[in-house]
Amino acid sequence: MDLMAGPVRSKEIEILKARTDAMQKRGVTPTLKVILVGDMKASLIYTRSKKKFIENFGASCEIIHLPSSINEAEFLAEVGNVVGDDSVHGLFVQLPLPKHLSHIDVGDLIPGHKDVDGFNQKNIYELFKGDRGDKALLPCTPKGIITLLHHYNIGLDGKNVVILGRSEIVGRPMALLLLNHNATVTVCHSKTQNIKAITGNADIIISAIGRAKFLDRSFLGDKKPVIVDVGINHDDAGKLCGDVNYDDVKDLCSAISPVPGGVGPMTILSLAQNLLQATEMSL
Ligand code: NAP
């Protein structure tokens, strides 16, 4: 079975529309601002597709496009203006920032109640304490993966889940969120020894390492695991692909999220859900 985002988004967008309509009846339009610095092609594409999805259910999204030459003081002032604007319910800074700004911890710049990316320490602390998203605005990719698994009735309680990758935006928050859903979690990284013995015993494998078609059948045991592919890479022919060698493993797993069409669109759905949660919390 392919874990496609399409059916999940079709169902969830109706819920997002209804929640937005209800707020608009109270005179409030959920409003997102995105701060984009520079002209990196991938960032331009990501921000445009986020805007399109948000506007599709009646919320508002503005991209504040700043030149890559902007200095730190000007950048911080721009973020500060949006943070202080009461008509804005959520905002995020599209990463990566240009090199001269990359030391800035954007999670610290945006207050927890507007932090639709879920990177602020207040939200991370709620996640750390066991929240499943009732209090915290959760990091979008891990949240989207939980929504995807839930939609396809893939339970987590007591499951042996192996995560490949320990980044701040995927691997680490994913591990916490899975713990909060009662999974037994193992996190692997570049220093992990004998990874195949670990993945071979997994019920669910979540790969977020950023290496094209890295995970093949040699990583799988007899368990027919569920595989979630977070990677966004390009193969030798320049074609978009995940971390997983889809054709090699598809008959040896019980379900797999494809790239494209799996986790990527779920991340955008989570952003939209976080925007509405932030707006509702502000009323
Ligand atoms: P990242 O910051 O690049 O970190 C990669 C992680 O993978 C690190 O923890 C690294 O270990 C680990 N790793 C690298 N090679 C490994 C190996 N051979 N075996 C085991 N672990 C290995 O990762 P990221 O930002 O989470 O991104 C990962 C991928 O997901 C990228 O392709 C990115 O484009 C994609 N992504 C997709 C979405 C989406 O919405 N679909 C969202 C975010 C990211 P060390 O810590 O030891 O270096």
Image: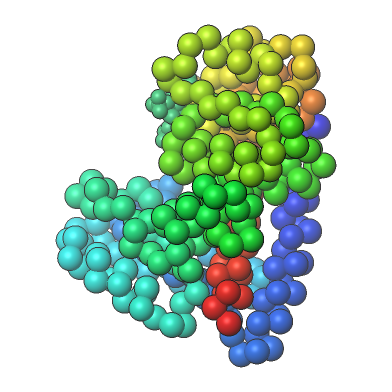
Q: Nearer the viewer, residue 78 or 70?
A: 78
Q: Which residue does the image show at 52% across and 47% down from the upper left?
A: 128
Residue at image location 54% in from the left, 19% down from the top? 214
The answer to whether 217 appears left or right of 152 in the picture is left
Q: Quadrant of the C terminus?
A: bottom right
Image position, residue 169 (x, y; %): 46, 43
Color theme of the render: rainbow
> Would residue 262 be seen by someone viewing this image from the given angle?
no
Which quadrant holds residue 39? bottom left
Q: Quadrant of residue 226?
A: top right
Q: Position of residue 253 (x, y in %)?
A: 76, 22
In the image, 186 versus 139, the foreground residue is: 186
- Give me the residue at 75% from left, 67% from top: 15
Q: Residue furthest front?
A: 129
Q: Is residue 87 left or right of residue 101?
A: right
Residue 13 vs 199, above or below: the answer is: below
Query: Relative to 255, does residue 62 appear above or below in the rendering?
Result: below
* Quadrant of image for the N terminus: top right
Q: Is residue 100 visible?
A: yes
Residue 122 is left or right of residue 185, and the answer is left
Which of 42/145 is in front?
145
Q: Position of residue 146 (x, y in %)?
A: 67, 45
- Relative to 189, residue 33 above or below: below
- Residue at the image point whose x is 56% and y is 41% from the top: 176
